[in-house]
Amino acid sequence: MENPSADIPDSPLFARRTLLRGGAVAGLASLVPAYSVFGASRDAGPGGPEPSAKQLMLTKFKDPLRIPRVLRPVERGAHDELTVRMRTADVRVHSELPAVRMWTYEGSYPGPTIETVRGRRLRIAWENHLTGTLPVTAVDFGAPGGPSADPLSNYPGIDGCQEVPGVAGLQPWAVVHLHGMLTGGGNDGWMENLIAPGDVQLSAYPNDQPATALWYHDHTHHVSRFSVYAGLAGLFVCRDEEEQALDLPRGRHEVPLVLSDRNFALDASGALTGTLVHKVEMVGTKLMRTHAAPYTLVNGVIWPYLEVDPRWYRLRIANTANSRIYRLMLLADGQPVPGALQVIGTDQGLLDAPLPVDGALNLSPGERADVLVDFGAFRGQAVKLVNTMEGVVPGQSSTRNDLLEPDVMQFRVADRKRAGRSTPPAVLSSTFERMGHHDLHDAARRWVVLVGPGAANVPELWEMEEVPQADAAGLTLPAAGIVQVKDADGTVTTLRRTAMDYDDGRAVTVAHDSVEVWKYLNLAASPHPMHIHLAHFQVLSRDHYDVTGFDRTVRGTARPAAFVKAAELEPHERGEKDVIRVGTAGEIRLGPNGTPGELVTVAVRFPVTGRGVHHCHMLEHEQHMVRPLVVAPADHQHAGGHH
């Protein structure tokens, strides 16, 4: 496999060698080994190892943060090429834990960071060299009476659990999805176009979108919750001239933070073995509580530390966990520091200006955030990045919420004079523009309703159509599949379900280069991160709705879901996106009324064509909350009089 250096001929688009030397090579570091460790260049700051929760047995902040190796493609005339191999490997995730058998990209977890330049078309050969069966033990547990206040998923081992049938012998089929890349359906990693060991997936990516961090992962239909958990995930960074001109922190001051969670088996003596365990709680026979494991990994290291200089850093944060929503806060002396995290970019690129995070940075699975932190404000201190829950004191545990150990990582700030610039750029992207509802009055409107467990006892995704007012007047409510919505102006819209299963009817068909308004209404107890392939979008609004009129037995509204109040968009929701959380972050209410209802409205652009999907990115929901999506040229849809 080729792993080229920075000496790449100039691109016809712009001086590529200059960009790479000044940005990419000086960006996420020019790294040769499979992993590198870096931190402050001189004396380490304070801080040190700490015990974790007793049942977890591993020491926190004992191991340094690793930085994944960087891969850059080779120029082949008008395009670039790269080969990435999927391999079974033994990976060290903590110095007190035996090596963990994983399915990986290039032998590491996460896989290497692929770094590219905007405007250079990219071809990747994803080679499947995986061996053996799935290196994950899948188990579940449950008891009558509903969810436990202290579920077994908080702890390692499989005692009290039963094996999930059909998982242990899964063969290493795979398909790679480059999440967030705007490429046609034929190159998107269609989830049923699997490759066997010895085969290769050839994908061509236009690679013509603003500088940002995407990520690549396995997307095998029905089993992605196990294959991604096994280790098939990695970061993808694209650079451009606009980003390069900003003089943002770079080199060892630009740090990727790939977040995930895992659980492990125990041997007969009660010691950790390093075998991956996917353990979930079942409520009833089929309803699976979204997966949340007790060990937090950053760049494949459990609770690492990073030695930093007293200056600004750029953190490229990606939530690659199966289902856990990370509500991140920075704690100094045990107290949250409002505004310590400044968001400069979202899933699909830079914002126009930095936005401070006053509370928690809420990242649901699949979301990324480009963040600046001024460690100069914490000179000579140890600060923590922690995961929090609504209603729980930041830094404290909550077993009921699968948060036995809330710490994510530790930063040790050197005690010396500040270095680097003192303030971030006031202006970031001059090309980014926010859209508003007023810009889209002629756009087609599409409704997606997220519903709690139905007859199959799993959450559901309903595609809906608006019912003409005359037809709605004759309906007897509640009726199955009929949802009424009353907006802030008091207007009632009646919706009829058209599809909810993957195989229901034809796919949603959208015109190429069109813009549509998608309205996601959550009637369920759980928040859902919604992802659209072949597209990117801006969030127009997030509104709270009273959804207590939804009859969960009949599966329709007895009275309309009614507008309560508008909610503020969070800083990382104000840019270009490809995943949006619908529902209250960090809070799942399982009482009769569930979580407060939310209506999230997004303006979706469809710049590429082909067949893709839209789905919930909680991987435990992906196999049933997924529907096909087709983007086609508008004239093709009506050629020859066909409608």
Image (cartoon, rainbow, N blue to C red):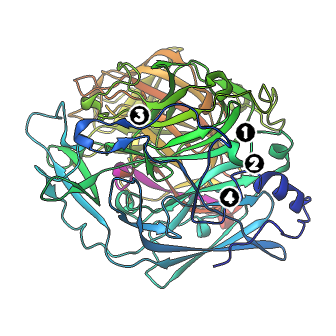
The region drawn magenta spans 620-633
Q: Nearer the viewer, mark 4 or mark 3?
A: 3
187 up-or-down from 571: above or below:
below
Under circle 4, the secondary element is loop
Q: Which residue is mark 4?
A: 608
The alpha-carbon separation of the residues under discs 4 and 1 comes to 21 Å
From the viewer's perspective, tell me whether residue 379 is left or right of residue 473: right
- Residue drawn 40% across the image and 32% down it: 522
Q: Nearer the viewer, mark 4 or mark 2?
A: 2
Point out residue 264 in the picture as x, y percentages from the top left corner.
27, 54
Q: Residue 43 or 244: which is nearer the viewer?
A: 43
Callout 4, which amino acid?
A: Val
Callout 3, which amino acid?
A: Asp
Callout 2, which amino acid?
A: Pro
Sequence-earlier tag: 4 or 2: 2
374 up-or-down from 216: above or below:
above
Q: Which residue is mark 3?
A: 407
